[in-house]
Image (tube, rainbow, N blue to C red):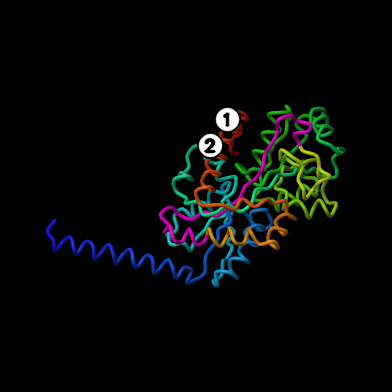
Amino acid sequence: MNHALRLLTFAVLSFAAGSNGAWASDYPSKAIRWIVPYPPGGTTDVLARIMAQRLTETLGQPVVVENKPGAGNNIGTELVINSPADGYTMLLVNPANGINASLYKNLSYNFIRDIAPVAGLVRTPNVMVATNNLPVKTVAEFIEYCKANPGKVNMASSGSGTSTHLSGELFKSMTGCNMLHVPYKGSGPALIDLTAGQVQVFFDNLPSSVPYIKGGRIRALAVTSESVEPSAPDLPTVGATVKGYEATAWFGVGMPKNTPTEVIAKMNAEVNKALADPAMRKRLAELGGVPIAGTPAAFGKVIAAETEKWAKVVQASGAKVE
């Protein structure tokens, strides 16, 4: 390469780097789409709307939640993966993203490869809730009822491959309960049918079930976390009856791969700032959420660890997509 060409190449690269840096410093300059791969009303939707409101205030541009349910989370996920890597399309990352890697055999994408981790949001326990029509008040009574009535217990989930589905499959494999899996398009529709007695049990994310529990419309039996949940101190853990049982849901923010690192760093900083705010922490705690603030790399490790964990559960339980 001659001297003139070297100078030209250097100038082009310098201009590109400078332009990218300047562009990133102006980010965001327009509305940001935040894709939630579930219908309104569930935990993913509730968390996204709480955080979107805060980010809208701090970023000075609208952060607009768009619900894109379907195909066990895959429709919304693919939409983000195939969007421009410019920081203006985000994904509400959730347990299904880790579970689907092993549950679905022919995905058109590799989540760990195709999504850039941006920031963790919260980790929440699931809660084992039953219809009021069921004559049980404890996990032990539920197991006894289930075994005395094989094939008569329908287990709702917010969709095949969700944490609510696999939490139930883990329970089935550890207790021998014979339950029919009934997938819904989100927690909202599942809770409506649980209230009506169309299904008998649901291992729901705690935040979306809280209003129904407090309103006496469904009965909470236990939380799925390893220890008692501070926001629901009267509820025992499933593990107190089923030794070794533990399942929690986790949520965060992702963007398409190749999104500029400066953009990811800015969004990460804004999310972490929001999670450090006492008012925000109080609101999340009321929903049973424990913040998992940290670097993009740290959230990437959460995704990888959860993907590995649930792959073992999928294999052990024999869970399949209906």
Q: Nearer the viewer, residue 180 or 6?
A: 6
Quadrant into which the N terminus falls: bottom left
**Horizontal and vertical percent position of residue 24:** 42, 66
Label 1, residues with CA under 10 Å away: few <14, some 14-19, many ≥20: few
The residue shown at (76%, 49%) is 193
Taking the magenta stretch, the answer to whether it contains residue 10 is no
- Distance, label 1 to label 2, CA atoms, is 8 Å
The residue lying at 65 percent from left, 57 percent from top is 47
In the structure shown, which secondary structural element does the residue marked by tag 1 occupy? helix
186 versus 130 height, above or below: below
Q: Which residue is mark 2?
A: 102
Query: Can residue 108 be seen here?
Result: no
Using the rendered view, name the quadrant where residue 144 is placed. top right
Could you say which quadrant of the image residue 242 lies in?
A: top right
Q: Are marks 1 and 2 in contact (CB under 8 Å)?
A: yes
Question: Hey, what amino acid is under mark 1?
Answer: Gln
**Quadrant (top left/top right/bottom left/bottom right) for the C terminus:** top right
The residue to which callout 1 is attached is 315
Which range is magenta?
Answer: 238-267
